[in-house]
């Protein structure tokens, strides 16, 4: 008995062919920065605790330096979980005729911008974003609302693709 592969329906294959770019927030640079920061803070705090001879003082039967390490580890875990939650809850899909931003896990929200609703595009990159080639893309619509794509990898390349899709003229043939 073999595995049978069912062909994709015409609708789903057409939808896949219309996708120009698909992405999620790129959280790796932020994870790396937070990890380095927590390690640097831990080194300074441990050095201060040992310098002032309080590292081996006990609080609730546990040495102070272990409490410090535990609290920093818990802080690091929660900050990394937050970034992973942001990555899991946002999807950006650029199609040949629109840009869709989906957000949410329990309650999903989808926002679609078509070329007729597109007004302006802005790319914001911090110093670390320029080093790691990441940034935010803000789409301004004609309805005066903003659509923010956070932590996009290669934001200049993606923004060029968005401009290319949104600059296409829309032709409607009437009767």
Image: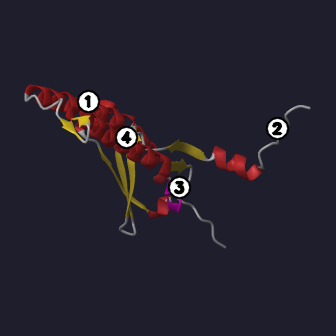
Which type of secondary structure does the marked residue at label 2 adopt? loop
Mark 1 and mark 2: Cα distance apart in space: 49 Å
Asked if residue 117 is positioned above or below residue 4 in the image, the reply reads below
Q: Earlier in the sequence, mark 3 or mark 2?
A: 2
- The reply, left or right, for residue 166 in relation to residue 6 is left
Mark 2 = which residue?
5
In this view of the protein, which residue sits in the foreground, 2 or 82? 82
Q: Position of residue 65 (x, y in %)?
A: 22, 32
Mark 1 and mark 4: Cα distance apart in space: 13 Å
Mark 3 = which residue?
98
Which residue range is magenta in the image? 100-112
Assess disc 2: are there few (<14), some (14-19) or many (≥20) residues with their C-alpha within 10 Å of its C-alpha. few
Residue at 37% from the left image edge and 40% from the top image edge: 77
Mark 4 = which residue?
77
Visible residue check, residue 10: yes
Q: Nearer the viewer, mark 1 or mark 2?
A: 1
Q: Earlier in the sequence, mark 2 or mark 4?
A: 2
In this view of the protein, which residue sits in the foreground, 58 or 22? 58
The quadrant in which the C terminus is found is bottom right
Q: Is residue 84 magenta?
A: no
The quadrant in which the N terminus is found is top right
Mark 1 = which residue?
39
Q: Position of residue 102 (x, y in %)?
A: 51, 56
Q: Earlier in the sequence, mark 3 or mark 1?
A: 1
């Amino acid at each position: 008995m073999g595995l049978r592969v069912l062909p994709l329906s015409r609708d789903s294959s057409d939808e896949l062919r219309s996708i120009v770019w698909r992405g999620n927030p790129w959280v790796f640079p932020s994870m790396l920065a937070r990890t380095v920061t927590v390690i640097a803070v831990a080194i300074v705090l441990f050095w201060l605790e040992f310098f002032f001879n309080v590292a081996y003082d006990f609080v609730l039967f546990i040495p102070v330096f272990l409490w410090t390490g535990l609290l920093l580890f818990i802080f690091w875990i929660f900050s990394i979980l937050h970034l992973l939650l942001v990555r899991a809850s946002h999807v950006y899909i650029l199609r040949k005729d629109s840009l869709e931003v989906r957000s949410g896990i329990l309650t999903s929200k989808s926002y679609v911008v078509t070329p007729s609703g597109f007004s302006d595009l802005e790319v914001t990159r911090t110093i670390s974003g320029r080093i790691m080639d990441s940034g935010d893309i803000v789409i301004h619509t004609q309805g005066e609302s903003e659509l923010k794509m956070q932590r996009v990898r290669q934001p200049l390349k993606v923004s060029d693709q968005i401009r290319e899709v949104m600059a296409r003229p829309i032709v409607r043939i009437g009767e």
